[in-house]
Structures are given as structure tokens and as C-alpha cells.
Image (cartoon, rainbow, N blue to C red):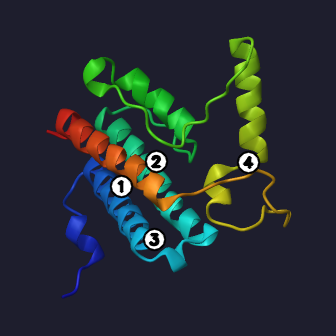
Amino acid sequence: MQTYSWEGADRDTPEQFLAFSKAYLRAARVICRDLIENPDEHTYENGCACMFNARLSVELFLKATLFKANSSTQLSHDIDALFAQFKAAYVGDAYAWHPPFIVEVLGASSESEQLDRMKTHKKEYKQDQALRYPRSRDMQLWQHVVAFSATEFQNELNQLASDVARLESEIFS
């Protein structure tokens, strides 16, 4: 069986982004399940591939919802910025969720300090890049410790799939 790129051409932009989001989430879940079933394959690199697919799924889902809201979406790879736009476009308990890959700062004494720490962290550790490449653009190893457990991440993926299904029903139906 063959599939072709034009098969989704009749869908509108939000639906196309949603379809890609769900495909990347499926890929992350398949990789994660495979890592659990095959412990010898449970490596940092395979964990990064799993997390990158999940992260891309979140990014594309947020973009799909923003296109659906006819928001003047600022396209970027910044999950925090996209989530801020989502929260502005979709207000209310029905749209509440906490997607993975959001940067959180603990121990900041003010909102200003929190924002400064977030900016510094994002500048030093480009999450979307660190999950794709073993080294930064200047060929330095990433300076942050990242741990990955397929068993624990599977719980995150299950929650993400549940949230996406619930929000899809609210936003795209």
C-alpha cells in the first residue's frame, strides 16, 4: 500500500497540523513501547528520539489549535511561547492542560527573576536542538544533564495522548 503527500491536501491548515501532531505522538509512543520491551535498546540516543517526536507533537498540536483559532500565530519552535498564545486564545477550564516540555523555574524570588532564568536556560539549552543533535552548533557537548526512563516517559505520553484527545474534541469538533 502506498500513501501520497496530496492525500491530506483537502484538509485545512489546522487539520493538517493536527494530523502531523498525532503522527509524531504515535511515533513517540511506538519508540517508547519498543524501548520498554527491548531494554538493550534503552539508550540516551533512542530516548532523545522518543522525546523529540513527543516534543514535535506538542509543538504541532499547539500550532494546529492556534491556526484553528485564527490566531496571528507567531511560528516558532518555542513551546513556552506557543503555549502562552494557546492560553490567550483558549480561556476556560475546558482548555486547561499542562503540556510536557514547558520550562519551569523553581526558587525565583520574583517574576522578573523567573523570566531572566528562563531566558538564560533557553539560550544555553536549546531543547529542540539538544534532542536532535549530540552537540551544539559550536560543537560543544550540551552542558545539561538529561535523564530518560522509557517506563516513566510512557506515563507522560499516555497523559499527553489523553489531553490531546480531550482538547481535539473541544476545539476541532
Number of the front mark, 3 or 4: 3
Amino acid marked by disc 4: Tyr
Q: In this rendering, would 95 be left or right of 124? A: left
Residue marked by disc 3: 35
What's the CA distance linking mark 3 and mark 4? 25 Å
What's the CA distance linking mark 3 and mark 1? 21 Å
Number of the front mark, 4 or 2: 4
Residue shown at the point (48%, 61%) measured from the top left: 150
Return the x and y of residue 101 as percentages of the image width and height. Answer: 54, 43
Q: Is residue 122 above or below residue 143?
A: above
Residue shown at the point (22%, 35%) measured from the top left: 171
Amino acid marked by disc 2: Glu
Q: Where does the C terminus fall, quadrant-wise?
A: top left
**Sequence-first disc among 3 and 1:** 1
Q: Nearer the viewer, residue 85 or 147?
A: 147
**Sequence-first disc among 4 and 2:** 2
What's the CA distance linking mark 4 and mark 2? 17 Å
Residue marked by disc 2: 59
Question: What is the crowding at mark 1: few (fewer than 14 residues within 10 Å), some, or many (at least 20)?
Answer: many
**Sequence-first disc among 3 and 4:** 3
What's the CA distance linking mark 2 and mark 1? 8 Å
**Sequence-first disc among 3 and 2:** 3
Residue marked by disc 4: 125
Amino acid marked by disc 1: Ser
Residue 21's tag is 1
**Sequence-first disc among 2 and 1:** 1
The answer to whether the residue labelled 2 contacts the one labelled 1, judged by CB atoms less than 8 Å apart, is yes
What's the CA distance linking mark 4 and mark 1? 24 Å
The answer to whether the residue labelled 3 contacts the one labelled 1, judged by CB atoms less than 8 Å apart, is no
